[in-house]
Image (spheres, helix red, strand yellow):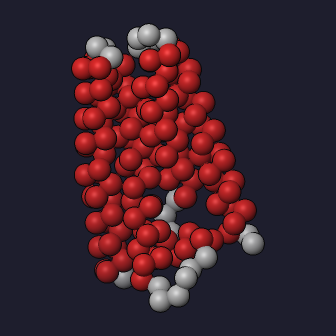
Amino acid sequence: MSETLEYADRTFELIGYGFAVPAFAIFAALGVYVLESVVYGTIMGVFAGGGTVLYAPWRLRLSAVQKESDETVPFAAAVRRAGGNAQLAMLGQGLYLGAFAMFTIAFVFAGPNLLVGLAVAVPIAVFAPYVGSTLIERTSHE
């Protein structure tokens, strides 16, 4: 791998960590100030921050591949050129969606219930990457 590609990959990873800090902080703050539960907010923050760390670098690489090409790049070709682990990226997206689901479900039950929140967030965090990975794999074989 050339130094330029290593530098770009490292930059995308650092940007992912940079995005993760406010994602964690926002969801933790929502848990503390809106839902009035430090534990619930922290878990939402971990889901959102961890998901961002996994998803953002891959998405940035994908965008860079599409931007540097002169012609329109099909999605499957862009995924192949972007490299990285698409399954991990989809897991990250699922974790982030799980944080949103936890926040939403707290309003349905008129307050944060950790067991119910996790019972909703974990299946979403597992199901979303399964669907995303399946779709990416199908488009890359066409």
| Residue found at the far right of this picture | 142
On screen, residue 76 versus residue 89, left or right, reads: right
109 vs 90, nearest the viewer: 109
Locate the C terminus and report the quarter of the image it occupies: bottom right
Q: How many marks?
A: 0
Q: Position of residue 25 (x, y in %)?
A: 25, 35
7 vs 116, nearest the viewer: 116
Asked if residue 39 shows in the view, the reply is no
Q: Position of residue 62 (x, y in %)?
A: 47, 68
Q: Position of residue 5 (x, y in %)?
A: 36, 77
Q: Position of residue 141 (x, y in %)?
A: 73, 70
Asked if residue 46 shows in the view, the reply is yes
Question: Which quadrant of the structure image shows residue 79?
Answer: bottom right
Residue at 50% across / 16% down in the picture? 108
Residue at 64% across / 60% down in the picture? 136
On screen, residue 134 versus residue 4, left or right, reads: right
**Above or below for 43 versus 25:** above
Locate the N terminus and report the quarter of the image it occupies: bottom left
**Above or below for 129 versus 38:** below
Question: Which quadrant of the structure image shows residue 10?
Answer: bottom left
Residue at 42% across / 43% down in the picture? 51
Question: Which quadrant of the structure image shows residue 106?
Answer: top left
On screen, residue 119 versus residue 50, left or right, reads: right
